[in-house]
Amino acid sequence: MSLLSALSFGNPIALWGLLSIPGIWILLKIYPPVPKTIFFPALRFLNNIKNEEETAGNTPLWLLLFRILLVSVLIIAFSQPVYNAKPKFLNNDTLLLVIDNGWSSSINWEKRKEVLIDYIDRAQQQQIPIIILPTAPKNNVLKKELLLLNALDAKSNIEFLTPNPWPSNYKLVNDKLEELPNDKNYKIIWLWDGIDHENDDSSQIFAKNLESMGNLSVIDSLNNSPVKIIKNVSSINNNNFSIEIHRNIGSLEETVFLRANGNKGKLLNRKEVTFGENNRIITTDLIIPNELRNELTSISIENVNNAGAIYLFDEKWRKRNVGIYGDKEAFRTQPLLSPAYYLDRAINSFHKVQISQIDKLIKDEISVIILPGVGTIGEAINKELKEWIKNGGVLIRFAGPNLEGSNTDLLPVKLRSVDSRAFGGALSWTEPVSIKTFTKNSPLYGVNIDNDILIKKQVIAEPSSDLFNKTWASLEDGTPLITGQKYDKGWNVFFHVTANADWSNLPLSGTFVEILDKIINMSSGQLESEDNIPLSPYKLLDGFGRLVEPTGEALPTDFNKENLIPSSGHAPGFYGNELFMRSLNLGDKLASLTPQTVTFMDETIIEKFSSNNTFELKSYLLIALLILVFLDYFISLSIRGRINFKNLVNISKSIIIFSVCVISLNFSQAEAKNKISALETHLAYVLTLNEEIDATSYLGLSELTKVLRERTSVEAGLPIGINIVEDDISFYPIIYWPIVSNKNLLTENTIKKIQVYMKNGGLIVFDTRDQSPNNIISKKVSQEQVYLKDILKSLDLPALIEVPENHVIRRSFYLLDELPGRYTGGSVWVEATAKNSRDGVSSIIIGGNNWAAAWAKDNSNKPIFTVIPGGEKQREFSYRFGINLVMYSMTGNYKADQVHIKSILKRLSNKSSEKSEK
């Protein structure tokens, strides 16, 4: 796009003024500059005067061109030129904003919102209606009708809109398009992420439907920014994980860092990984120290904030409780003769080992049970073992002399009744045999085989049609060494050699350790019997890859369901409870991460995403005009010979006036916010850089403002979000400060500003938002409380106390016993004394009841968050508390004398009784 073609004018009529330039040219030629005046006795120059007629001098060409330039700049400035302006809408248009807000949209999310707000502002100028359609909607959005919104409601929707941790669903959104009336002229803006989410033609169909509805503009919101996701995580061995990282664009070399995270964000390991040019997939390994394996909660890509860049680890990845059948006494007294000794040495470094009887192991909910050389199993125990395997247990059996005549229904294959093959025996090898490399179909594929392993004796399996499929490891001659079979949810595995060194040296090798670890990790941990029950959401990922509390839309998830794809009801995250959790990872469920290939019509406009590509040139031209006027004034003085010491004062004044004009142009917009705040009362909230919390604060205070207008004489404007570090906070009577987990240290100037605000009568409400029933019961100290303490340490505050029963805040408008928000029961704190304040009012209120969430409502006037445990009655009391807060901050302690109302009434009663007696 050329420079001229990118220019547009808000007031093009002003350009007609350029036609006046020829006339100005003529006038400037007719009226030259005033000649230079010299005061000097010049009679002597009259001698030899020539009596010739002379004409006035012409304006110099350079000065003429300079002044023509000055006039041209003035005319163009008033035409309001804009560089790269978006086209205007027609008056009969309806603006349809289609927004890809799936898991991949978290990149530059704030800038995307700026683009959407820009379109809404232009729609507001022409007063055309707006429809907002997210392509990864939540369930409650899908159930609602697509409404025509005005600009204010549309902006509120965009403020609360966040990326969701599941893919865009174009099939689902296509059905919503059919609900729109066909008699409207749609201007469609599609904020597109450019990713093929479903590996089908749904995106192409969706694009065609949009094009058939009206004029379509597609904004490529990724703009060559790679999206990354973690896929195909597997355990190589006991402490080494194989991880694939995929990206959708692979043209440039790129370096990322993998993090292994423990509880509370503890760093367990960190590794640098580099994508080569034209490489979209890279496989790497990440070592977790064995002693830290059970602490591993997730692996994430550093500084990539989406739900696909984090992989959650649940019970199946942790150390297993392994039970070995054996005699504890024999294990202690003669360990080298006990097969359990070799098994214990191979396993106990990586898993928890318990040696006991079979029935005891089953009752203790062991994940894996190993039976070394056990022959016949009692009928009752046999039945219990079968049921245990069905529920997800892994049974590992080893061969031995006692196996002959064994009941074989707990073996994966049938064995020859008495046949065993030994080096030098009847069914002999000429020499011991080594292990054959594991095939790709084997669960043991990838395990390194030591070259010095030799098998001297083995139990022979009965040939059958399915023997090959059940063989996990075989010898060089093709006979089975390890066989296994899926048994409902569990596994039945058999080693055709002993667990000690009698038949082979396998138990003495590192290969034996890796094989056992592979098999043990095939179990899914304890309490697997709950797998057939849908698990309730416990902690879920949001669109930025953060674990948050589940909302009311989250549904129980059946992990046995095939093709389980993350969606609104089944977001990625943890399901279950503190004792047993299963993780649902986005990377496990997405087929691929490939760029989308959609063919658009020639009429469709394709734009690259940019939030700052529109420039209004008027202010810059006015600054240039002031500079030109100043230079013209200086030139005029120079031509007239009036630049001397006496006129330096005038020139200095001109420079000062010019500087003031420039400064006023540059800072007029910055002062606008303060002017608005000073002219009208506004409730304020601190911006936290957490979009969902900021949106909740805005919507909550907006609803509280509305309630204030309805029930009181307070006529407040819309709430204003403030940057506590940069913005002036002195205009706001009350500031709501939600505490978040990302710790931001306050600067010394900010602390002084807050201190001055509170001393001058301002009220700050700190809300840690953590008084949920779970936190109250567990009595945990949340991260928000820790960060709040750090903030309070830096402020000069008196002692804090819980709000007493007779405190003014309980009666400043309504009489309140409780001060609830979304939660109730949490302590609310105020200053113990307010002598230092201007009017005896506490300058600080601290609580954790999440008041803004209780107040917040959506555009359909429905509450966004559930209120626990009191429901809508509790929500009403939270509004009353909010009104009391505002009245307390604005009117101080004017109702403090009401604490004496009982004694006043008693005195009045006594006086009336005395009069009646007289």
Image: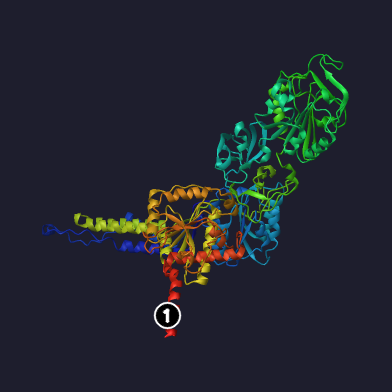
Q: Is residue 445 above or below residue 78?
A: above
Quadrant in which residue 67 is drawn = bottom left
Q: Residue at x 88, y 25 (%)?
A: 416
Decide which of 62, 600 is in the foreground and name it: 600
- Depth check, front residue: 917 or 506: 917
Percent coordinates x, y for residue 130 in the rendering: 59, 63
Locate the C terminus by quadrant. Answer: bottom left
How many numbered circles does the render carry?
Answer: 1
Viewer-proximal residue among 375 and 452: 375
Instruction: Farthest residue to the front: give it.
Output: 917
Residue 642, quarter of the rendered image: bottom left
| Amino acid carrying mark 1 in the image | Lys
Q: Is residue 50 left or right of residue 846?
A: left
Mark 1 Cα-neighbour bin, 10 Å: few <14, some 14–19, many ≥20: few
> Can residue 642 be seen at all in this image of the molecule?
no
Which residue, given by chain and number where applicable, does mark 1 sit on? Answer: 911
Report if residue 147 is visible in the image: yes
- The residue shown at (46%, 49%) is 789
Identify whether 508 is placed above or below 276.
above
Q: Could you say where residue 835 lies in the image, as x and y percent from the top left?
A: 37, 60
Give the x, y percent position of residue 699: 54, 61
Q: Position of residue 695 (x, y in %)?
A: 54, 57
